[in-house]
Structure formats: C-alpha cells, structure tokens
Image (spheres, rainbow, N blue to C red):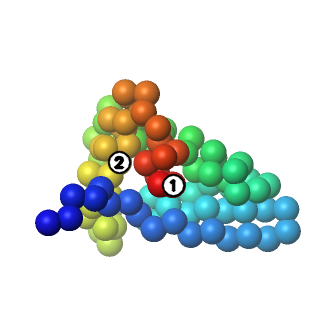
Amino acid sequence: MDHTPWTPTLTLETRTGHCRLHLEGITYGNGRDLQEAGTDLLVRLFDLAVGVRQEGYRLPSGVDPRVPDFLWEIGELALQGGDLRGRVFG
C-alpha cells in the first residue's frame, strides 16, 4: 500500500517577465520568475489552509475529494512551523 501523501498537480505558465504556478484545483501563484511565483503560491496556500482549519470547508462539486485532506495537512504543517515549500514542491 502506498503511503505517499497526495499532492495536487503543479503546472507552470510562463510569458516574458511573468510566471504563474497552478496548484490544480486549489490556488495559484504569480511572479516575475519561478521563485517569486512559488512564494506567492505558498502565501495563498497558507492563508487558505489556515482558514480551512479555523472556519471549515465545503467541497465544491467537481473538486478532487482529496483536496480537504491536503488542505488540512498543509494547515497542520503551517501551524507547527513546518516546511510548506518542501511539502508542496518536493
């Protein structure tokens, strides 16, 4: 049995002077380069995950059913001061 934690697919869009990272079905990050887009994505993900832990979350139709567990895990990691970058980007 595989116990590797699930992580949504990451995709990258680039244009001259602009990058956008998508964490499929959850959020995105924008920046002038990959590093900046990654940081923006992590800030958005942190805010979302902490909000889910504090306020709850209703899963919209069509969203991968693993998303709430992923957000809960990210929120737990954030509250413990863990490495979000390592968890999301591997």
Say which element carries label 2. helix
Q: Which element type, helix, strand or loop, lies under badge 1?
A: helix
Quadrant occupied by the N terminus = bottom left
Residue at 32% x, 60% y is: 6
Q: Which residue is mark 1?
A: 89
Residue under numbered circle 2: 71
Residue at x 63%, y 46% (from the top left corner): 40
Give x and y (percent) for residue 32.
79, 55
Q: Residue furthest left?
A: 1
Residue 17 rendering spot, x and y as whole percentages = 85, 62
Q: CA distance from mark 2 to mark 1?
A: 15 Å
Q: State the residue at coordinates (56%, 63%).
A: 22
Residue at the front extreme? 1
Q: Quick check: 27 left or right of 62?
A: right
Q: Nearer the viewer, mark 2 or mark 1?
A: 1
The front one of 73 and 49 is 73
